[in-house]
Each structure stands twice: as structure tokens, then as C-alpha cells.
């Protein structure tokens, strides 16, 4: 009898962040824990598949129309259809793998190139001492790679040194600026200086992504590999000029991710897979990493920032490598108790507290902001701040309920202010 999809359930959970990273994640990625769980039931009572979609951070959500289109059909018909949305495509791979008695990677390729895939610990913008604590946790949990977001409001030299002080020589630190170094002329001195630390792995997006001439200028002058997010429109130019060493393969469904990975491999360019989520997403990503020949840089799923991986048996991680599941489908068992524990009625999340952000430039100057997006614009788009000042730091002050705070925050919403423009207060 042909296998059919008989029902698709969708419900939302909200998984909290781990305690140490929570206040820093809340500054920009506060909603990453809001996840839609997709449960696919089939005409075979024993075959049920699961997937997940990060509601506020995904390449595509699951639409009502898509659900209606899949119910009643053979799940194998839809595996290559990236328009399904993240969670549903994941769940269908889980179902079909179970039906055939094979792990997901067997549905992607007849050739497996690795049993264990390199994996990275991930952190957003954080002070150096907290990153060192994160690195200690990463080592304890089997990681040997650490991707961090680098920004002008923290001194990257202090961050790299703090991590280096608590990790072995084999521990890799990958640095991601998201274009914050702006131009090759501003970027090159900083990148050359970072060559002093042996643990630095690669430089991701130091300048603006669309500065293809700048990438070509930088690559031959850099002491470390240069990486960028894969872009279909820019890929031919990057390859023509041989201006990048590696890619971030991201932002697509299975077919798109496999295509990006195969294109990179055709030019002998290494890459890492970046698909954010819990243990479900990590298992899903491992299956692709197992068959893509050039997926040799540590993958990023951000699983480490969440308080729960949502699976019964955790992903096995040792010596910086994660084992690809061998059981049919995704090869992991959903933790039903955890799902019920974090289940919520809405994908909306409570607003994070109003905060006043204080950027100390390290030379006595201080600048204040109403939120992280405003700080981002001031540093990158408007170019009002130096790209990587020494001894820089960021702190924040939560709403204390005073009229003074409310008035200051109101003023900051219009534009950032220097310390001389603010009356002395607790946060200045």
C-alpha cells in the first residue's frame, strides 16, 4: 500500500535561552526560541515525522496552503520542494527515511563522505569574560570550534585573547563581522593584527557583502581564509576573480542548500552549513554535512544557546565533531515532555525590557542608544564610529521605571547621543 500523509499538526513552543547568553541574545535575536513544531502523521500508524521552523528566523515558514497540498499525497513526492517551508520539508524527510528504513543522508546521495561532521559553538555579541566562560562550556560539551559575532562595541583582541587563555591550541575561533569593518582599507590593519593569535580560524564578512572588488583586494593580502554568505547573483563574480576561500551555505531548503554546496565544491571552495535550530535541526543539518564533500568548516546551528535540544538522546559531540544519526529518517527521537513543557498559544513573545545601551569607545567617549538596531546603523550604515576601537565595551541599563529613564529613552529613539548631551544619571 502506498504511504500517504494523513494529517499535519502545527503548534508553537518557546524554548528559553541558556542563562548566561539570554540578556545578550535578547538585544537582537530575542525571538529565536519561538519554534513551530510540525508533526506529520501517515497512513502507516508507526511512521510519524517531526520538523521545526524558527518562526522569526527562517528562510521560509510553512503556509496553510502548503499543508493542504501535502495532505493525502505520497510524502516522497515533495522532498525536493523547498517551497514547503523549513519544518514541513524536514518532517517529510523524517517520514520517508523511516518508511524506507534508511537515514536521511541516504535520500540525498548514494555516497557518504563522513560519519562525523565538524560543528561550532555559536555566540552573539558578548563581553570577553563571558565568551571565555562560553568557551569552557564548549570544551566540556565536546566542541573545538567557536564562531563569534565581532562588533566595534567590543574589543575583538580582548575577546580572542580571553578565549585563547582557556582553550587548547586546537580550539578554533571564527570571526564574523557582518560587514562591520566596512572597507578593505579599514579592515586590513585589524585582520592582520589578529594574525597574532594562532587560534583564529577564518574571517567572515569583514566588509560589505556586495563589495566584490573589495573581496578580491583583501584575499591576497590576508593571513587567514576569507568567507562570505553564498549569494547566487555574486557567486560567478567571486569565482571569476577567485576572491573568496570559503562560503556560508545557508538560507534555503534542502535542494537549495545542496545546490549551494555542490557549486562551491565545483570550484574547490570549502564551506559550512548554517541552519539554526534545536537538536532536530542539528540532526537534519548533519545529514547534509555527511554527503557534501566540501562541508569541512564547522557547521553552525546555534543549538548551544538554547536551554533544551528537544530530543531524547542528545547529538553525540566529541573532539569537535558531531556524529551523524544512523537510525531511519532524522534519526532522533523528539522529547514529548519538553515539547509540552514549552508549548505556548501564540508565536508572539513578550517584549524585552526597554534598555539604554552605552557604547564606551575606550578613549573616554561614550555614546548612548535606544536599541541594538540603532547602534548597528550608527556603526555600519552611517559610519559614525571607528571600526574596531581598542578597549571598547558595551553595557546596558534596563528600564528602572523612573521619569528620567523614560525621558532619556524617548530622546534616544530620535537619535543616539554622546555623554555630553545627557544629564548625569545612573547609566552614564
Image (spheres, rainbow, N blue to C red):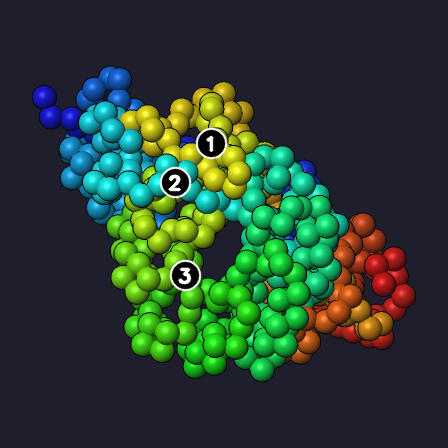
Q: Is residue 133 left or right of residue 212?
A: right
Residue identified by numbered label 3: 247
Asked if marks 2 and 1 touch (Cβ < 8 Å), the reply is yes
Label 1 Cα neighbours within 10 Å, binned few <14 / some 14-19 / many ≥20: some
**Disc 3 to disc 1, C-alpha distance:** 25 Å
Q: Earlier in the sequence, mark 2 or mark 1?
A: 2
* Above or below, 386 relative to 278: below
* Above or below, 286 relative to 376: above
Residue identified by numbered label 1: 315
Residue identified by numbered label 2: 286
State the image quarter where residue 360 is shown: bottom right
Closest to the observer, 260 or 296: 296
Label 2 Cα neighbours within 10 Å, binned few <14 / some 14-19 / many ≥20: many
Image quarter (top left, top right, bottom left or bottom right) of the N terminus: top left
Residue that protrudes farthest toward the right in the picture? 424
**Disc 2 to disc 1, C-alpha distance:** 10 Å
Amino acid at each position: 500500500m502506498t504511504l500517504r500523509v494523513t494529517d499535519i499538526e502545527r503548534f508553537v513552543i518557546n524554548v528559553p535561552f541558556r542563562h548566561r547568553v539570554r540578556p545578550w541574545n535578547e538585544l537582537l535575536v530575542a525571538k529565536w526560541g519561538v519554534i513551530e513544531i510540525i508533526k506529520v502523521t501517515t497512513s502507516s500508524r508507526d511512521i510519524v515525522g517531526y520538523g521545526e521552523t524558527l518562526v522569526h528566523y527562517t528562510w521560509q515558514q510553512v503556509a496553510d496552503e502548503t499543508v493542504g497540498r501535502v495532505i493525502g499525497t505520497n510524502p516522497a513526492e515533495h522532498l525536493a520542494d523547498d517551497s514547503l517551508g523549513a519544518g514541513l520539508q524536514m518532517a517529510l524527510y523524517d517520514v520517508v527515511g523511516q518508511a524506507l528504513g534508511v537515514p536521511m543522508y541516504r535520500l540525498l546521495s548514494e555516497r557518504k563522505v563522513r560519519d562525523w561532521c565538524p560543528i561550532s559553538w555559536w555566540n552573539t555579541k558578548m563581553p570577553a569574560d563571558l565568551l571565555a566562560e562560553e568557551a569552557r562550556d564548549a570544551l566540556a560539551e565536546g566542541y573545538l570550534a567557536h564562531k563569534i559575532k565581532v562588533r566595534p562595541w567590543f574589543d575583538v583582541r580582548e575577546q580572542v585573547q580571553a578565549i585563547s587563555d582557556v582553550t587548547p591550541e586546537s580550539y578554533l575561533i571564527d570571526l564574523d563581522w557582518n560587514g562591520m569593518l566596512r572597507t578593505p582599507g579599514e579592515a586590513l590593519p585589524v585582520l592582520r593584527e589578529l594574525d597574532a593569535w594562532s587560534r583564529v580560524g577564518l574571517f567572515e564578512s569583514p566588509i560589505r557583502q556586495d563589495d566584490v572588488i573589495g573581496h578580491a583586494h583583501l584575499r591576497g593580502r590576508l593571513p587567514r581564509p576569507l568567507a562570505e554568505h553564498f549569494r547566487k547573483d555574486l557567486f560567478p563574480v567571486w569565482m571569476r576573480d577567485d576572491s573568496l576561500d570559503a562560503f556560508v551555505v545557508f538560507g534555503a531548503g534542502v535542494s537549495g542548500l545542496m545546490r549551494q554546496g555542490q557549486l562551491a565544491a565545483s570550484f574547490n571552495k570549502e564551506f559550512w552549513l548554517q541552519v539554526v535550530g534545536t537538536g532536530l535541526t542539528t540532526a537534519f543539518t548533519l545529514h547534509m554535512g555527511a554527503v557534501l564533500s566540501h562541508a569541512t568548516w564547522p557547521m553552525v546551528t546555534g543549538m548551544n544557546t538554547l536551554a533544551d535540544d528537544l530530543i531524547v538522546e542528545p547529538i553525540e559531540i566529541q573532539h569537535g565533531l558531531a556524529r551523524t544519526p544512523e537510525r531511519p529518517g532524522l534519526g532522533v527521537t523528539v522529547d514529548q515532555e519538553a515539547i509540552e513543557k514549552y508549548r505556548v498559544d501564540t508565536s508572539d513573545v513578550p517584549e524585552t525590557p526597554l534598555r539604554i545601551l552605552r557604547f564606551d569607545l575606550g578613549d573616554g567617549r561614550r555614546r548612548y542608544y535606544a536599541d541594538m538596531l540603532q547602534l548597528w546603523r550608527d556603526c555600519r550604515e552611517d559610519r559614525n564610529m571607528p571600526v574596531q576601537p581598542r578597549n571598547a565595551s558595551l553595557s546596558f541599563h534596563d528600564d528602572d521605571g523612573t521619569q528620567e529613564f523614560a525621558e532619556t529613552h524617548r530622546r534616544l529613539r530620535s537619535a543616539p547621543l554622546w555623554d555630553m548631551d545627557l544629564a548625569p544619571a545612573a547609566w552614564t
